[in-house]
Image (cartoon, grey):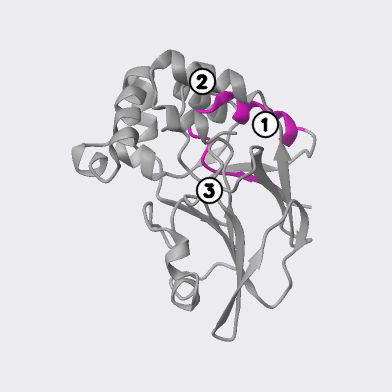
Amino acid sequence: MTRFAILSDPHANFEALNEVFKDIETFGVDRIYCLGDVVGYGPEPQKCVDLVREKGAKVVMGNHEQGLINIHYLRRFNQPAMDALRMTRELVTEETYQWLVTRPKAIAEDACRFVHGSPPDSVNEYIWKHAEDMTPVFRRYTEEFCFVGHTHELVRYSYRGGVSEKLPLPQGETLLVPDMRHLLNMGSVGQPRDGDSHAKYGVFDLEARTMHIRFVKYDIQKTVDLLKQHGFHSAFGDRLW
């Protein structure tokens, strides 16, 4: 049995990320993958980076990590997000900064591809732009399974014979049927955009071809209070509820 924990978009929300890692421990997974945006929006980037590194997670670059590289990438963000990234730079060590900006754009192993935005290795492209027809996206890469983040939504796409289908990715276990390729959008640990305040992540069983989506409670108010304390834009706290 080969099981991976797959999480995305912690966004410097340590309270959410820490509870997710506690939940992961109950599954005894073989590996942990993080699909980027460890930082951005949230008040505790250093603690989040320290935690994903401590847990040995394999981390790909998110657009918020990329936004730290230089002004060219930073200008792609709206003003509150730009301000948050400037604050993030002040809240992490130089060594952590160097680690963040040198993450790979994609990881491919065990018939799986892990990327923040869209395969094969886009950090910035939103997968929903292709929601009406994902065929061109599936043709960009060869792996059987692909896991993406970036949109903060839970949704999946299946592909066979030149035809793609959009399907739900609900809480609990979903079977990814054989003889098809699958792309899964893994939601967000630290900045939900789906109207549900839980931190979300998944446990993928490679042999059984199942994805178990987990909804995890955490102390939202503590994160909101820290956002206010550090002077982050109020919207980043409002979104958590």
Q: Is residue 199 left or right of residue 146?
A: right
Q: Is label 1 or label 3 in front?
A: 3
Outermost residue toward the top?
229
Query: Which of disc 1 and disc 2 is earlier in sequence?
Result: 1
In this view of the protein, which residue sits in the foreground, 72 or 225? 225
Vertically, is 221 above or below 66?
above
Residue 179 badge: none
Q: Residue at the location (45% across, 13% down)? A: 229
For label 2, the residue is 47
Residue 42: x and y in percent read 46, 28
Q: Amino acid at mark 2?
A: Lys
Vertically, is 193 above or below 86?
below
**Element marked by disc 2:** helix
For label 3, the residue is 152
**Element marked by disc 3:** loop
Outermost residue toward the left?
72
Q: Amino acid at mark 3?
A: His
Q: Is label 2 or label 3 in front?
A: 3
How many neighbours does mark 1 have within 10 angstroms: few (below 14), some (14-19), or many (20 or more)? some
Chain part drawn in magenta: 4-25
In this view of the protein, which residue sits in the foreground, 39 or 237? 237
| CB under 8 Å between discs 2 and 3 | no
The reply to whether residue 193 is visible in this rendering is: yes
Query: Which of disc 3 and disc 1 is earlier in sequence?
Result: 1
For label 1, the residue is 21
How many neighbours does mark 3 have within 10 angstroms: few (below 14), some (14-19), or many (20 or more)? many
Q: Is residue 211 left or right of residue 84?
A: right
Q: Residue at the location (55% across, 30% down)? A: 52
| CB under 8 Å between discs 1 and 3 | no
